[in-house]
């Protein structure tokens, strides 16, 4: 008679192992995240081999799409279909909610390629995903996400996920496996780095200019690339920092979108012990009313988020 041997934890656990044994997510959610990670590997490859030009089309926001925006969107679409677990999805690159499998348990919102205008400059870019239970995302709040993740295509490609039990980081290795590099990422309460987006707003939002001056006077260090995935990853990687995208006359609610960008990052940052706010309350508590909803966002180290909200609250 043979005795079943327990699975030992490998030195470098794979994403699949981690989802199963550390996060203990349900099997169908694990399959979905693994299929998303497969799409990300294809995008990683496409970034290295596809021409950086425009696609000659615009997305729902009237923004010019680059070829890689369209390709990344299609790759994710294919892999969500393959997973057989997705009822509906919403992509930043599409106008409508797409229905996939009526029996699917989850719905996914994603920004296929964040920072895509930076491709030709060879800056880091990323993909962002928020996963909800059921077939509706509208009417829910980002707090209802059952998992959120992003993939950062930089000098190294990394995937960071949370399914409600901490935030974990994996690197794409040379055989095409995402393997664990850091577990339970944490964010300290005070920020030394700042990352200020939509800075054109300082011209008609004096409080934003006051905030900038405060950071300059206090000699915080600027770390801003123009790709939210890279800029927020900096906070998680360094364990401190603050990221803002505040409204002005061109974008009264700021430039970033609640479903595709702010919701998933608010979930990940709060899971890591940081805070998120739109100036008055947590981004996680904002009701999702429409696909193209934008929101001001302040995320990162708790004390700094509180201080920023105070400064911005003063007229
Ligand atoms: P996308 O490429 O998906 O349209 O998103 C770009 C976003 C985001 O990544 C970044 O934080 C922001 O645009 C940068 O805005 P500013 O250049 O106005 O700071
Ligand atoms: Mn984006
Ligand atoms: Mn995008």
Image: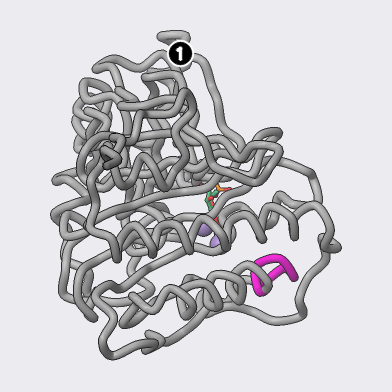
Looking at the rendering, in which quadrant would you find the C terminus?
A: top left
Q: Report which residue position mark 1 lands on.
A: 220
Residue 199 visible in the snapshot: yes
Vertical relation: 74 (above or below) 11:
below
Residue 252 visible in the snapshot: no
Q: Which residue is drawn at the image coordinates 78% and 70% (left, top)?
A: 54
Q: Which residue is drawn at the image coordinates 43% and 40% (left, top)?
A: 160
Residue 103 rendering spot, x and y as whole percentages: 26, 86
Mark 1 residue element: loop
Looking at the rendering, in which quadrant would you find the N terminus?
A: top left
Relative to 294, 78 lies left or right:
right
Residue 152 rendering spot, x and y as whole percentages: 57, 43
Q: Which quadrant of the structure image shows residue 108?
A: bottom left
**Front-most of 134 and 191?**
134
Q: Which residue is drawn at the image coordinates 51% and 15% (left, top)?
A: 221
In reply to whether residue 201 is colored magenta, the answer given is: no
Magenta range: 64-70
Relative to 121, 306 lies left or right:
left
**Front-most of 125 and 103?**
103
Residue 178 rendering spot, x and y as whole percentages: 54, 42
**Front-most of 94 and 311?**
94
Given the current orientation, which residue lies at the most extreme front position? 1
Q: Which quadrant of the structure image shows residue 294?
A: bottom left
């Amino acid at each position: 008679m043979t005795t079943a041997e327990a699975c030992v934890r490998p030195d470098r656990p794979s994403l699949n192992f981690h989802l199963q044994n550390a996060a203990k997510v349900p099997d169908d959610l694990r399959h979905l995240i693994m299929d998303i990670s497969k799409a990300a590997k294809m995008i990683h490859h496409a970034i290295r081999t596809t021409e950086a030009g425009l696609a000659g089309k615009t997305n729902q926001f009237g923004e010019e799409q680059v070829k890689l925006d369209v390709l990344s969107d299609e790759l994710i679409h294919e892999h969500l279909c393959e997973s057989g677990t997705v009822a509906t999805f919403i992509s930043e690159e599409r106008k409508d909610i797409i229905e996939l499998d009526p029996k699917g348990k989850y719905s996914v919102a994603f920004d296929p390629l964040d920072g895509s205008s930076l491709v030709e400059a060879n800056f880091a870019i990323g993909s962002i995903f928020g996963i909800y239970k059921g077939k509706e995302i509208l009417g829910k709040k980002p707090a209802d996400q059952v998992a959120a993740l992003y993939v950062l295509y930089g000098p190294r490609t990394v995937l960071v996920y949370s399914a409600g039990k901490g935030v974990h980081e994996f690197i794409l290795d040379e055989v095409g496996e995402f393997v664990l590099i850091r577990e339970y990422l944490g964010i300290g309460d005070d920020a030394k780095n700042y990352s200020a987006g939509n800075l054109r707003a300082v011209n008609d939002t004096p409080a934003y200019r006051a905030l900038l001056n405060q950071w300059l006077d206090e000699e915080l260090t600027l770390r801003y690339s123009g790709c939210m995935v890279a800029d927020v990853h900096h906070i998680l990687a360094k364990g401190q920092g603050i990221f803002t995208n505040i409204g002005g006359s061109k974008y009264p609610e700021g430039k970033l979108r609640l479903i595709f960008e702010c919701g998933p990052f608010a979930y990940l940052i709060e899971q890591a012990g940081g805070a998120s706010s739109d100036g008055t309350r947590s981004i996680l508590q904002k009701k999702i009313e429409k696909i193209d909803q934008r929101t001001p966002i302040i995320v990162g180290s708790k004390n700094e988020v509180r201080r920023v909200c105070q400064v911005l609250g003063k007229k």
